[in-house]
Amino acid sequence: MLPHENTTRLISLDMELSSRPKHRGIDGSRNLSAAGGLHLKQPPAQPMDRVSWLMLISLSVLWGGSFFFTEIALVDLPPLTLVLCRVSIATMVLWWVVLLRDIAIPRDPKFWAGVAVMGGLNNLIPFCLIVWSQTQITSSLAAILNATTPLFTLLIAHIATDSEKLTLRKTIGVLIGFGGVIVIFGLPTSGNTMGLLAPGAVLLAAFSYGCAGVFGRRFATTPPILTAAGMTSASSLMLLPLSAIIDQPWHLPVPTTSTILAVLGFATLSTALAYILYFAILKRAGASNLLLVTFLIPVSAILLGVGFLGEVLLAQHMIGMAVIGLGLLIIDGRLLSRPKPAQPVTPTK
């Protein structure tokens, strides 16, 4: 997955700031000053109508499908080359959207340096780790473990920021969520260390996503689609020499049609279109409702993996997923909160 969960805070800040008057610098570009010191209150969740639910489910299928497409494409392509194809194709689509929307492109070197860091934390590191892990474990298990991203984001934000400290409820949710990881892994023994490498890579990817979510606070005043295009551009440039040195893709056999289609789906549907749909849902339903996609992505990935790839999940994986989901529900808090009484409506003249 995915840049989705950890950018919710970043983009919700952008949505709030976008309603304020725009200030332009001498060169005419938008003011892209760092927002790391901002302490903005997230707007309350908006009601989810049928269209919002349909969009949310579609997004979960797109992001859950990334694990499915990876499994197919890995038959012909090594991990680094596959990730390079994903981010480079997505980059072209995203920049096309940026140009269509006539978004001002910043010239500040600090902005592009920050984007490069985001490209590493939010694309390069997690994408490569997850894709490599799927050479060893099923797409379904990778998707389940990737759902721990919000847990790592909360922990990192608690340590690295002054405004996002863990509450008792969130602490309990984090502990329960990581308890689900223990259920999936089982108690470590001296003989199963190698078997933990691939699942551990997914957890490391989730940690990287969490770091990106906290670091991304500085892009609060940047149009999200511009940040996304910058991230994929930076990760493409970083991956190009790595893929050339390690994979030497010019020596690979010509990919099959199924692999080509999987790569195109991976890049255009699960990355570029998913970003665009993500921003549309955020604007329509709010950041809190958008976090519901965290619960749906593993379900979509499991349905695709079991239904089309013949994958089999162990009972401990399903139980672990349920425990992680319980932790996320507690963190979300809406099921535990009492509904507020309806406020009387004052008639207007």
Image (cartoon, grey):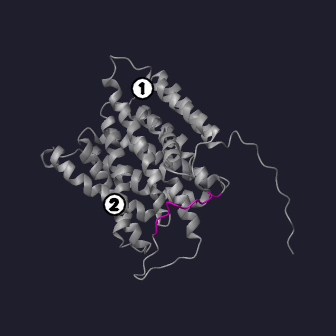
Task: Please give the range of residues in magenta.
Answer: 33-43
Q: CA distance from mark 2 to mark 1?
A: 34 Å
- Sequence-earlier tag: 2 or 1: 2
The x, y position of residue 222, in whole percent, is 46, 66
- In the image, 74 versus 34, the foreground residue is 34
In magenta stretch: residue 40: yes
Q: Quadrant of residue 332?
A: top right
- In the image, 157 versus 288, the foreground residue is 157
**Three-letter amino acid code at the position of disc 1:** Val
Question: In the image, 235: left or right of 216?
Answer: left
The x, y position of residue 253, in whole percent, is 15, 44
Tell me the quarter of the image containing the N terminus.
top left
Element type at mark 1: loop
Residue at the image position 46 percent from the left and 65 percent from the top = 34
Q: What's the mark number on residue 312?
A: 1
Does the rendering let one see residue 3? no
Q: Main secondary structure of the magenta part?
A: loop
Instruction: List the single residue furthest toward the left.
Output: 251
Q: What's the mark number on residue 91?
A: 2
